[in-house]
Structures are given as C-alpha cells and as structure tokens.
Image: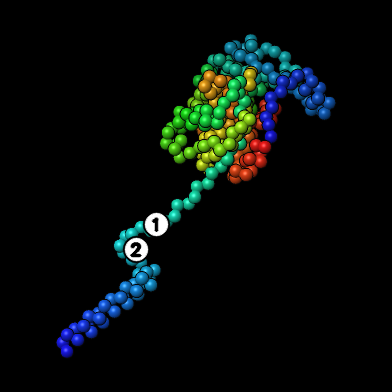
Amino acid sequence: MDEQLSLIISLISLALSVISIILIFYNMKYIKINKILKIERITKEKKRKRRYVVFQVISEGELTGYDIISEIKSIISKFWGETRLSTLNPSIIFYSNRNGILSVEKEGVDYIIASMGLIREIKGVKTLIIPKITVGTIRKAKKLVK
Amino acid sequence: MKIVFLELDKIKLRDIFESKGIKVYDRETIEVRNQADLRRNKKSRLLSARPTSINAARICARSSFIDLLIIDSKNEKVFDNKQIKLMMNTGKGLEIRLSFPIDWNLIIKGIRIGRMTSAVITTCSSTIWEFISPYSTLKILNLMGLPKVEGITWMSNYPLLFH
C-alpha cells in the first residue's frame, strides 16, 4: 500500500510541475521573465538602403571599372579616413562605353559624389568623372545609362 | 543622357542673347595692388578684383567699380573681420575659387564669409581637365557644413543680384 501511495504522489507532483511549466510559458508576457533574468531581446537588424549613382567618364585613355573604384576608394580614405570608407562600402555594378553605375550606402552618397569631383588622373591618364544623377533602384539606373 | 563639352564663340552668343532681349555683360578680372589699378571706365562690364594686400582689399570694398572680390588660397589672410563688415555694408559679393590642390581651410573660411555677405563659387578652370562638375561642388560644400538650398543659390548667383 505504501509503495502505491508514494507512486501516486510522485505522479501527481510530476503532473503539477508540467502544468506549472506550461502555464509559465503561456503567461510569459505578464510575468516578463526577460526583464527578471535581464535577457536582451534579439531584434532584427533593418536592411540598409543603397543608392545608385550614374556617372560618365571623360579620359584621354581607356580605363576599367576596377581602376575607377580603386581611385575613388583611395580618395575617400585620403580625405575622410578608412573608417568612413568601410561604412560606405562602394562598389561598381555596371561599366561599359565610359558610362557606369556605382552603388553605395544611403548615408555615403555625398562622400562618393564629392570624391568623384576630386579625381584628376588615374594611372597617369588624365580623367574626369562626372556624376549625373542618383537613383534608388538598379532598374532605373540602367534605363538612364542606355 | 550624355554630357558633351562645346567650344562656343562669345560674339555669336552675345548676338543670340541680345536678339532675345537679354543684356549681356563682359566680365573682367583684375589684380589690385593700389588705387591706381581701379581707374577704369565701367561700361557694360563686370569687374572682379583679386586684392593682394589688406590696403587693396579695403579700397576694393569701398570702390563702386568693383562687383566681386576674389578669395583663393593665396590671398586668404586679407579677409579679416573688418573687411567682411565693410563688404556687408557696401554690398560686395565674394567669389570663392576652388582650384587644385583643394584648400579645405579656404572652403571653410569662404563659407563663413559667404553666409554673411553673398557668394559665388567657381572652379576658375581654363581647360576641361581643371573642371569640377556642379553636382560634386555642391556636395563638397554640403560636406563642409553649407545647407543644400544655400549651396544651389551659390552655384547660380551672379553679381547684379547682390545690389
């Protein structure tokens, strides 16, 4: 009889503990365990918006897209520093027939366009980079290039 | 959308503008060392002066012949506080020259003076390779602390608006 009683009591205690755990999970918002345990809520990072700069190159010789982006990066790092360059993250998307599209973080459009005006020569070739317009989508930018 | 550079004949341009009823002014730049340099007759001509000393700058600010005073990296020290006040009283404009290599201190000082008086910004380019596009110039000014709207007016200002 004693063994049976102890078994029943243990089963009841198990059932109670399971019910209490379920109740706690259901009423999480009222109990606010996160605050009690000081657990920081993990939030999703917002997707960073990018802008697309359409530009035209006037030069005595022929240049590649890589030459242009490397020169722009060197000018940004020279005038505004390496840290600024890392936040801007500029890259060339399209370049042909002396017309191109450059993508950059939304906050860095001013820096990119200003640095385009400061370029005088690339690899010993006299060059001018003229920014035309900034747009929000690649589709629009490609339409403008054509 | 393509950008093309054209060489234009000034006389032909004058004829085109005058046929449409627009008055055309010639612009001349002089370097002022003393008062004798200012004795010129002003007939349909805008005079912009580049003072080389403080005395010359004071004379230019008072003279009625001069419309614009040029500031560049070499005569930057000429423009002190009294000079700026004098320019404000007489209604003289300031021309900021952005030439290579770019002097950032000059831009900061130019913006400070230009916001008190009135200013025009130029690249003073004689060849294509010295040219800075207006979009880039505007962004350079914005990065140095000038608001966008004010920057656009600086790009399109002309001296007759100042009076």
Count of all numbered marks drawn on residues in the image = 2
- Chain letter of mark 2 equals A
Q: Determine crowd level at label 2: few under 14, some 14-19, many 20+ residues with C-alpha closer than 10 A.
A: few
- Left or right, B85 with respect to B2, comes to left
Image spot of residue B41 (x, y percent): 72, 14
Image spot of residue A37 (x, y percent): 30, 62
Please tell me which residue is depicted at 64% across the width and 18% down the height of the picture. Answer: B126
Q: Nearer the viewer, residue A18 or A54?
A: A18
Please tell me which residue is depicted at 82% across the width and 28% down the height of the picture. Answer: B21
CB atoms at circles 1 and 2 under 8 Å apart?
no
Image quadrant occupied by the C terminus of chain B = top right
- Specify the farthest residue to the bottom: A1
Residue B129 found in image quarter: top right
- Chain letter of mark 1 equals A
Q: Nearer the viewer, residue A120 or B22?
A: A120
Residue B147 found in image quarter: top right
Image spot of residue B146 (x, y percent): 55, 35
Q: Can the viewer see residue B21? A: yes
Please tell me which residue is depicted at 34% across the width and 63% down the height of the picture. Answer: A34
- Say which amino acid is labelled 2: Asn
- Residue position marked by numbered label 2 in the rendering: A34
Q: Is residue A14 above or below residue A141?
A: below
Q: Can the viewer see residue B138? A: no
